[in-house]
């Protein structure tokens, strides 16, 4: 597994740009990590809703089962990537704390 896109030159970026890029990157990570499952679940639910409307089956447990299955599938497929990105962001945060501490002393 190649390095994260945030790991390349992260010390230089922290020194040049500061904490602002760290905050922006953390918000973008939140959007991607939570947005991917939400979009997948919305698409799967829409397909099931269309199928239920076409067949006139009004069982609510089917929709919940599809949502749960979609979420599990997304976590299995994208969980490794999300974990790596969260760890990389955590490491950058610790490096930023160290860099800020050195500047102030």
Image (spheres, rainbow, N blue to C red):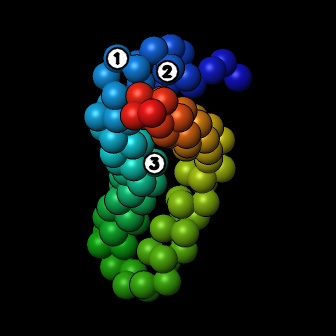
**Residue drawn at (40%, 20%) of the image:** 15
Which residue is label 3 attached to?
Answer: 33
**Residue 48 x, y percent position in the rendering:** 40, 65
**Residue 69 x, y percent position in the rendering:** 58, 64
From mark 3 to mark 2, how far is it between C-alphas?
A: 20 Å
**Residue drawn at (40%, 34%) of the image:** 104
From mark 1 to mark 3, how far is it between C-alphas?
A: 27 Å
Which residue is label 2 attached to?
Answer: 10
SS label for mark 1: helix
- Work out which residue is located at the far right of the displayed protein and give it: 1
**Dot 3 surroundings within 10 Å: few (below 14), some, or many (20 or more)?**
some
**Dot 2 surroundings within 10 Å: few (below 14), some, or many (20 or more)?**
some
**Residue drawn at (42%, 54%) of the image:** 34
Residue 78: image quadrant is top right
Question: Is 84 situated above or below 44?
Answer: above
**Dot 1 surroundings within 10 Å: few (below 14), some, or many (20 or more)?**
few
- Dot 3 or dot 2, earlier in sequence: 2
Which residue is label 1 attached to?
Answer: 16
**Residue drawn at (53%, 60%) of the image:** 71
- Dot 1 or dot 3, earlier in sequence: 1
Q: Nearer the viewer, mark 3 or mark 2?
A: 2
Q: Quadrant of the N terminus?
A: top right
């Amino acid at each position: 597994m190649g390095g994260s896109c945030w790991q390349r030159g992260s010390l230089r970026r922290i020194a040049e740009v500061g904490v602002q890029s760290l905050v922006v990157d953390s918000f973008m990570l939140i959007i991607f990590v939570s947005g991917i499952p939400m979009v997948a679940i919305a698409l799967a639910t829409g397909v099931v809703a269309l199928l239920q409307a076409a067949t006139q089956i009004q069982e609510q447990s089917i929709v919940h089962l599809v949502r749960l299955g979609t979420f599990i599938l997304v976590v299995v497929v994208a969980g490794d990537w999300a974990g790596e990105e969260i760890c990389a962001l955590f490491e950058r945060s610790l490096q930023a704390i160290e860099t800020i501490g050195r500047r102030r002393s």
